[in-house]
Image: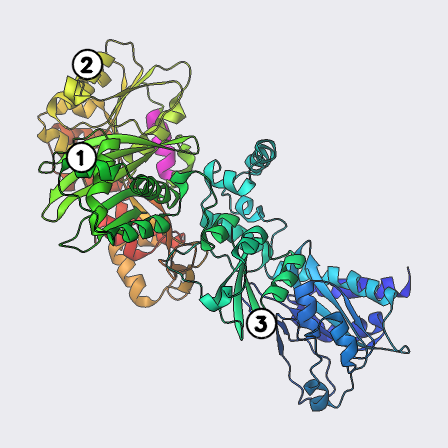
């Protein structure tokens, strides 16, 4: 092994053994100088949110010399130029301006550091620190020993060292090996699915990004975060409320920007400019940006091609239905200036056929679907005020956009026509359904119109067709999962999943059915509506207008040789009675009920005049559940539980049981919401279930038989291991999934 290889091996070992490169630098500095045969060496690194490259690793004989240098990304310094061009640079004499301008007309050498330190810089070798096409820093070497300048061999040695530095920097920045690795690491998608979509993208001539969103169940925010982790620059999505400063686009051909896929998004050309680009590792385009838009410094953001084109006034899709929603609203506002008159049915029907209104309605639905919304609310306002569109995401409403008052009726009428409703009837509430196809996938909507004093309000519930979630992924506690699996393995009985509307009851029931859906079982379901489909299930949609309701469907199922029956809701005596009788004749019956807790469910059914003896024998168990918002995994903040919160949680959980959680004041960590781009600065992203499982034991059977109250049944269930919704929520709080505010919101206090 040569001397250079031996030194490089020692440098590599010391770097890998250290926690950070900054810690290793004092030890390896002499080795670096020996390896590169130079008088000084400076290493610049970049952080994902840094606007500059930063050196904390200066060789210094003078204690007064700064310990940190920040260099902006531009072509006015040697390190900045290497960062922009991502190419090595060798300079014989940095004081020779002609030599510098021959490399780049704006390149200069900052002599102030030499003046402050008394050191005289002569020759310079600077190389980029890169992992694949991701820029991570600059290695800059000063004054070749025993030679007037650095040569090819020196450059090769420096590039070899830069590879070692790149591995360390990538590790410290938690960078990934590809733009999609973070999705696999965080289990947003399986590696095999990613390979499948990659192959599809090549065969279909489309982009992998598009397929990940449309077929892989990945949101744009999640995909953007994955890109950010790889390219080590922040992700930026499209913001329709953002206006690009006009001076940034002055003199630049927009067609050129669309073709090059970058756009100056913010700042001022005489100072700092923020650039949105789909590949921040493309050095050719980075230098093209510098030539096109000279600025003092550049800050980069990674984004998607379709969003860059939207900023440049061009949609990423040719289909008119995918036009940008805010562009469409802008068109409506322009039309409003023409005093469009919608006074009677004929005028309104004509207005509804306008392409702009049709596009807007489609876009509202599609954008809401992409944002994971469960409901879309169109709310008219008083007088000439614009209507508001709000969407419900993770159980909370938030504003989406506004619609000019002159076009609210046309938008509502368009939705009514899509849903098969009477557009001439504005005095009575109406209900309907419609289906919008998005890239071949149907999005089913349940539509309700309600007349208000300001006009008709519309609510659209998005019924996204989906597959059942595996039972193990419903976030049950281990004890609850074991008990549920035992209950549903029984040959007959009644099992109820209870909670308010939107608490995930249907999802849980289909997960349970999926776990027992085997060829030896005949399973019938009566649902309103059928939201989740499964092969092997015989699913029936209720149609109350022709008399097909839960009770009649249940009676017909009993004549169709069932093993398992699922009824959407036991809302009346007839349905509940038939369900109990069916279980006693050898069938397993699943159903739901709108009750607040598992013990209350028992008393509610007894209030429907069920025979307590039959019901106590039939009942296997009751699962109450709620959906609680989960903390955003990207920004949640840990902190040690203080005494006051400990006392509060102990009171909510129950002092006699709290010790089972193994919580210690000022030691156990819990989390609080913070807010970031991924979660829309709410601090929360997604929802999970909290559960309360009552298992019917012999003691509880006797309580049901004598019609005991809910509190008595609850006390007995707690003795048998049941944990309430509040207790399960607190358990998940200590798992870092949510916080007390969200648990209290859904489980009460």
- The label on residue 601 is 1
* Quadrant (top left/top right/bottom left/bottom right) for the N terminus: bottom right
Q: Reply above or below: 535 against 310.
A: above
From the viewer's perspective, tell me whether residue 654 is left or right of residue 639. Answer: left
Q: Decide which of tag 1 and tag 2 comes sooner along the chain.
A: 2
Q: Reply above or below: 410 against 735.
A: above
* Magenta part of the chain: 479-488
Residue indicated by mark 2: 555
Residue indicated by mark 3: 297
Residue 374 seen: yes
- Marks 2/3 in contact by CB < 8 Å: the verdict is no
* Quadrant (top left/top right/bottom left/bottom right) for the C terminus: bottom left
Q: Position of residue 483 (x, y in %)?
A: 35, 33
Question: What number of labels is visible?
Answer: 3
Badge 3 element: strand
Mark 3 against mark 1, which lies toward the viewer?
3
The local crowd at label 1, few if under 14, some if 14 to 19, many if 20 or more residues have their Cα within 10 Å, is many
Q: Decide which of tag 3 and tag 1 comes sooner along the chain.
A: 3
């Amino acid at each position: 092994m040569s001397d250079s290889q031996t030194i490089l091996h020692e440098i590599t070992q010391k770097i890998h053994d250290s926690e950070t490169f900054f810690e290793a630098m004092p030890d390896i500095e002499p080795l670096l100088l020996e390896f590169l045969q130079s008088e000084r060496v400076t290493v610049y690194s970049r952080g994902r949110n840094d606007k500059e490259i930063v050196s904390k690793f200066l060789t210094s004989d003078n204690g007064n010399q700064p310990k940190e240098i920040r260099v902006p990304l531009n072509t006015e310094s040697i390190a900045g130029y290497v960062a922009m061009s991502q190419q090595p640079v060798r300079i014989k004499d940095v004081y020779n301006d002609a030599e510098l301008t021959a490399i780049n007309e704006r390149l200069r050498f900052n002599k102030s550091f030499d003046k402050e330190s008394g050191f005289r810089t002569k020759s310079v070798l600077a190389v980029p620190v890169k992992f694949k096409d991701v820029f991570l820093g600059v290695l800059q070497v000063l004054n070749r020993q025993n030679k007037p300048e650095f040569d090819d061999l020196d450059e090769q040695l420096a590039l070899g060292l830069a590879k070692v530095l790149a591995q360390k920097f990538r590790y410290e920045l938690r960078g990934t090996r590809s733009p999609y690795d973070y999705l696999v690491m965080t289990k947003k998608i399986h590696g095999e699915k990613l390979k499948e979509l990659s192959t599809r993208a090549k065969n279909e001539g489309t982009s992998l990004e598009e397929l990940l969103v449309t077929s892989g169940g990945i949101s744009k925010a999640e995909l953007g975060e994955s890109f950010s982790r790889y390219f080590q620059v922040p992700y930026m999505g499209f913001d329709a409320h953002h206006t690009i400063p006009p001076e940034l686009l002055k003199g630049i051909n927009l067609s050129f920007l669309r073709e090059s896929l970058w756009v100056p998004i913010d700042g001022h050309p005489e100072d700092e400019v923020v650039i949105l680009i789909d590949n921040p590792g493309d050095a050719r385009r980075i230098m093209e940006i510098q030539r096109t838009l000279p600025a003092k410094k550049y800050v980069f953001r990674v984004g998607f091609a379709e969003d860059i084109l939207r900023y440049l006034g061009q949609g990423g899709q040719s289909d008119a239905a995918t036009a940008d929603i805010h562009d469409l609203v802008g068109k409506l506002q322009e039309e409003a200036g023409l005093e469009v008159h919608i006074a009677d049915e004929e005028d309104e029907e004509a207005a509804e056929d306008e392409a702009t209104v049709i596009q807007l309605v489609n876009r509202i639905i599609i954008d809401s679907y992409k944002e994971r919304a469960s409901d879309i609310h169109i709310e008219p306002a008083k007088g000439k005020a614009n209507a508001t569109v709000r969407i419900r995401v993770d159980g909370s409403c938030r504003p989406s956009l506004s619609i000019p008052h002159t076009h609210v009726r046309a938008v509502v009428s368009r939705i009514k026509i899509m849903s098969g409703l009477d557009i001439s009837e504005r005095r009575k509430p109406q209900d309907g359904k419609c289906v919008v196809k998005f890239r071949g996938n149907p999005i089913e909507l349940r539509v309700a119109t309600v007349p208000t004093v300001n006009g008709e309000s519309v609510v659209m519930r998005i019924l996204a067709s989906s597959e059942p979630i595996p039972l193990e992924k419903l976030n049950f506690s281990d004890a609850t999962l074991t008990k549920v699996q035992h209950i549903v393995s029984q040959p007959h009985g009644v099992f109820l999943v209870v909670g308010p509307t939107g608490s995930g009851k249907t999802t849980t029931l289909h997960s349970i059915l999926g776990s027992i859906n085997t060829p030896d079982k005949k399973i019938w379901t009566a649902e309103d509506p059928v939201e989740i489909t499964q092969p092997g299930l015989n699913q029936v949609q209720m149609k109350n207008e022709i008399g097909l309701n839960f009770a009649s469907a249940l009676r017909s199922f009993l004549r169709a040789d069932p093993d398992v029956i699922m009824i959407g809701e036991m809302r009346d005596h007839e349905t509940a009675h038939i369900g109990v009788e069916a279980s006693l004749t050898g069938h397993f019956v699943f159903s739901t009920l709108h009750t607040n807790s598992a013990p209350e469910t028992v008393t509610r059914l007894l209030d429907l005049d069920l025979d307590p003896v039959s019901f106590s024998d039939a009942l296997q168990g009751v699962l109450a559940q709620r959906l609680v918002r989960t903390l955003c995994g990207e920004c949640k903040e840990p902190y040690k539980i203080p005494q006051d919160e400990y006392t509060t949680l102990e009171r909510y959980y129950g002092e006699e049981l709290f010790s089972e959680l193994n919580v210690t004041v000022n030691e156990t960590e819990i989390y609080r919401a913070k807010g970031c781009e991924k979660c829309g600065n709410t601090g929360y992203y997604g929802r999970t279930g909290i559960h309360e499982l009552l298992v019917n034991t012999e003691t509880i059977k006797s309580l049901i038989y004598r019609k005991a109250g809910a509190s008595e049944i609850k006390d007995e269930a707690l003795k048998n291991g049941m944990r309430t919704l509040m207790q399960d929520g607190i358990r998940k709080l200590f798992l870092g999934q949510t916080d007390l505010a969200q648990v209290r919101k859904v489980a009460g206090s």
